[in-house]
Every structure is written in C-alpha cells, then in structure tokens.
Amino acid sequence: MKVTEKDIKTVASLSRLRINEEESGEVMEQLDRFLNYVENLQSVDTSKIEPTTYALPMQNVFREDEVKPSLDRELALSNAPLKEDGYFKVPRVLEE
C-alpha cells in the first residue's frame, strides 16, 4: 500500500498533529513501512491458532469470601480527624 501526501495530511488532521513539509516525507515513509508490515502479517495463516485471552495462564487469586466480625465502631473512628454521632465527618463536596 502506497501512502500519499493526502493520506499524511488527513491522518495529521484527524490526530491533531502539525506535520510540516520537511517531516512529511519521513512520516510518509514510516507509515508506508508500517502498513506494509501489517499487510505481511495478514498473509500469515492463523486458521489453526486458538484465540489467546492472556499470554500467561490465569488462575483466580482471590480468597473465598468469609463472614468475619467487623471492626468495632469506636476503634474505627479512633483516628478520624472529625467524627459526629458515630460516623466519619467530611467536608461537604456538593454545592447547593
């Protein structure tokens, strides 16, 4: 696939890049090489290859859920800078 000057200008516009005339030739050559590489990859027969979700084998690393007693409320609030009526008190973040 041959990349044209118009292609470079279109891609630059869509990606909000400024590519001056001196850079345009180099960018055109790089994009052309990249597209040729992708074209070569498309010719590889992958019909007998299973899709891969992860490169490494995955296993569940989470522990089983177990019901345990909660932290005592007073202990949880003991280091709170502000507390009121048994709850953490925080500055209001919504404007009225």
Image (spheres, grey):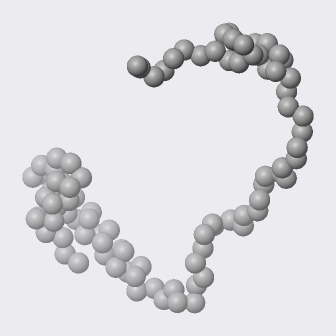
Q: What residue do we see at 90% from left, 34% from top?
A: 69
Q: Position of residue 18 (x, y in %)?
A: 16, 47
The quarter of the picture where the N terminus appears is bottom left
Instruction: In the rendered view, tell whether residue 43 sits above or below residue 33.
Output: below
Q: What residue do we see at 68% from left, 65% from top?
A: 56
Counting the numbered discs, the total is: 0
The answer to which image quadrant residue 40 occupies is: bottom left
Is 90 on the left or on the right of 87, as rendered? left
Q: What residue do we see at 86% from left, 23% from top?
A: 72
Is 35 on the left or on the right of 74, as rendered? left
Is 89 on the left or on the right of 26, as rendered? right
Would residue 92 be visible to someone looking at this image? yes
Residue nearest the viewer, comparing 65 with 84: 84
Q: What residue do we see at 16% from left, 50% from top?
A: 19
Would residue 25 be visible to someone looking at this image? no
The answer to which image quadrant residue 58 occupies is: bottom right
The answer to which image quadrant residue 96 occupies is: top left
Instruction: In the rendered view, tell whether residue 52 sits above or below residue 31.
Output: below
Instruction: In the rendered view, tell whether residue 39 sits above or below residue 95.
Output: below
Q: Position of residue 66 (x, y in %)?
A: 88, 47
Q: Position of residue 83 (x, y in %)?
A: 69, 12
Q: Position of residue 93 (x, y in %)?
A: 48, 21
Is 91 on the left or on the right of 70, as rendered? left
Residue nearest the viewer, comparing 45 with 80: 80
